[in-house]
Image (spheres, rainbow, N blue to C red):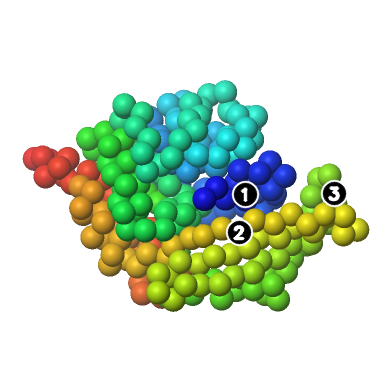
């Protein structure tokens, strides 16, 4: 199903307000310092891809045209090859020094088959010696428990509408582990309520490790947050960094 949070222009305008460049942005900027080419899968509104475009070849892939419209209008937006496509199936026919998938975009792929397809896309676009990095929330942290209306209520300073009331609601399927959350924005004076329902998965590290191996990828290290700390069972994030296994095997 199409997620209105990313495909509806009225909702997309809130994305950058709620997702300002943070620790993941800064870590990936530093991580990309030696890369001459970067593929940003699930690039969204293009914050990272555009920031990396000076002096290197960058492609940004996202299935949401409304997000890519914002990306194209950014500074350096004309320097990025924006591609409207699904990360599970896109094939650009070229390799990159670095493939990134941040902002917890990996979690929108709900099944092991979908997750395996995305990892195959990463493998298909890595040059020999190239590296990948992506993030997914650690299910042990049960972060979804904070996404209730009471705990998530917030005020957002919108450039056109002023103070916009926002909140989330959430439910979790215990059988699949898939979390469904609703995002709501009430325009001032109660004139309009914008909302969207989103679904995300919380894969465990052990299962993710198997999928990575099956995709022909190896992990050189696991981070537990974007400050660079090693992964432990209580880490908020699961962040694998690695490359193509056959390239590792071929190394002298």
In-image side of 76 versus 232 (left or right): right
Rounded to the nearest whole Å, what is the CA distance between mark 2 and mark 3?
22 Å
SS under mark 1: helix
Mark 1 surroundings within 10 Å by alpha-carbon count, few (fewer than 14), some (14 through 19), many (20 or more): some
SS under mark 2: strand
Identify the residue under disc 2: 197
User: For this rendering, which residue is in front, 101 or 219?
Assistant: 101
| Sequence-earlier tag: 2 or 1 | 1
Badge 2 vs badge 3, beta-carbon distance below 8 Å: no
What residue is rendered at 74% in x and 65% in y? 154
Q: Is residue 202 above or below residue 87?
A: below
Mark 2 surroundings within 10 Å by alpha-carbon count, few (fewer than 14), some (14 through 19), many (20 or more): some
Picture coordinates of residue 163, whole percent (x, y): 83, 56
Residue occupying the far right of the picture:
189
What residue is rendered at 68% in x and 41% in y? 9
Picture coordinates of residue 1, whole percent (x, y): 52, 50
Identify the residue under disc 3: 161
In-image side of 56 versus 48 (left or right): left
Q: Is residue 58 above or below residue 236?
A: above
In-image side of 50 versus 85 (left or right): right
| Sequence-earlier tag: 1 or 3 | 1
Can residue 104 be seen in this snapshot? yes
Quadrant of the image containing the C terminus: top left
What residue is rendered at 31% in x and 54% in y? 113
Identify the residue under disc 1: 4
Rounded to the nearest whole Å, what is the CA distance between mark 1 and mark 3?
20 Å
């Amino acid at each position: 199903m199409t997620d209105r949070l990313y495909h509806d222009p009225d909702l997309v305008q809130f994305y950058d307000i709620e997702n300002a460049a943070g620790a993941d942005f800064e870590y990936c900027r530093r991580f990309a310092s030696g890369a001459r080419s970067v593929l940003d899968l699930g690039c969204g509104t293009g914050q990272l891809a555009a920031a990396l475009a000076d002096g290197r070849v960058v492609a940004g892939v996202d299935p949401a045209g409304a997000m890519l419209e914002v990306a194209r209008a950014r500074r350096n937006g004309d320097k990025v090859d924006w591609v409207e496509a699904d990360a599970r199936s896109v094939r650009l026919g070229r390799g990159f020094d670095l493939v990134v998938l941040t902002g917890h975009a990996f979690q929108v792929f709900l099944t092991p088959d979908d997750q395996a397809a995305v990892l195959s896309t990463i493998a298909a676009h890595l040059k020999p010696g190239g590296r990948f990095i992506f993030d997914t929330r650690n299910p042990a942290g049960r972060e979804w428990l904070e996404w209730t209306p009471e705990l998530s209520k917030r005020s957002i300073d919108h450039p056109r509408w002023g103070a916009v009331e926002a909140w989330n609601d959430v439910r979790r399927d215990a059988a699949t582990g898939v979390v469904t959350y609703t995002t709501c924005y009430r325009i001032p004076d109660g004139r309009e309520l914008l909302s969207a329902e989103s679904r995300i998965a919380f894969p465990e590290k052990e299962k993710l490790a198997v999928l990575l191996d099956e995709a022909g990828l190896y992990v050189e290290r696991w981070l537990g947050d974007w400050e660079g700390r090693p992964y432990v069972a209580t880490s908020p994030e699961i962040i694998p960094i690695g490359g193509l296994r056959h390239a590792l095997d071929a190394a002298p």
